[in-house]
Image: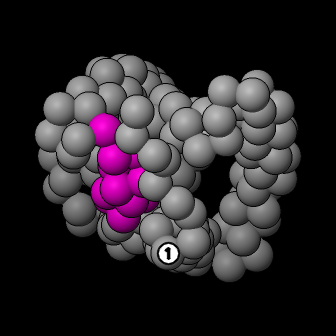
Amino acid sequence: LFLIENLQYSEVTAGVYLGMALAISTAARILWGAACDFLLNSRRKITLGIIGFIAGSSFVLIGLVNNDTPIFVVMLLIGVMGASAMSWPGIFTTYIAEISGSGRSGTTIGSTNAIMRIGIIIIPPIFGLSADITGSYTIGWLAMGSCAVIATLAMLFIAKEPEPG
């Protein structure tokens, strides 16, 4: 809807960009896993921190997009959102399993996923309401970016790194 209502893209173009973001997300999940294991010494928390900051930044930047923004910049931002905001669940699930231990990993992953699903149901209507009330998507994108950065900082400072082994 953002691309259609804010940038006046056609439904087909917006759909193609969504498909592009999903395809990039699929590849990025594999690449983030490889980067985590081979470049970052399997440090899931640091990997999630990097992904979180990239996602938060992409939300803020997409909030600044307007009709004068070159199409390649919009495509780049959508690609970055796919590679970050849409690609973290694999690393996150592994992280949750590792910090909870083998005896509690199923319960912990199930509980965490249930909480995340509640957010998936509640946040989009709030985002849409914000766009309806303000007549702009900017506040919603900036709020999403702020939430992503705050959540990432909280995770980096509060959460533990799993024990190697």
Membership of 136 in magenta stretch: no
**Crowd around label 1: few <14 · some 14–19 · many ≥20 (10 Å):** few
Q: How many labels sit on residues?
A: 1
Question: Is residue 84 shown above or below 135?
Answer: above
Residue with the most extreme front position: 165
Q: Is 143 positioned to the left or the right of 13 in the image?
A: right
Q: Position of residue 159 (x, y in %)?
A: 56, 63
SS at mark 1 in the image: helix
Tell me which corner region of the image, top left, top right, bottom left or bottom right, holds residue 7: bottom left
Q: Position of residue 115 (x, y in %)?
A: 81, 46
Q: Which residue is mark 1?
A: 157
- Dividing the image into 4 quarters, which one contains the C terminus? top left
Q: Is 135 positioned to the left or the right of 14 in the image?
A: right
- Dividing the image into 4 quarters, which one contains the N terminus? top right
Residue at image point 67% right, 67% down: 131
> Which sits in the foreground, 110 or 41?
41
Question: Is residue 4 shown above or below 15?
Answer: below
Please, what is the three-letter code of the amino acid marked with disc 1?
Phe
Residue at image point 43% right, 26% down: 22
Q: Over which residues does the magenta segment extend?
A: 42-55
| Residue 70 visible from this viewpoint | yes
Question: Is residue 146 shown above or below 39?
Answer: below
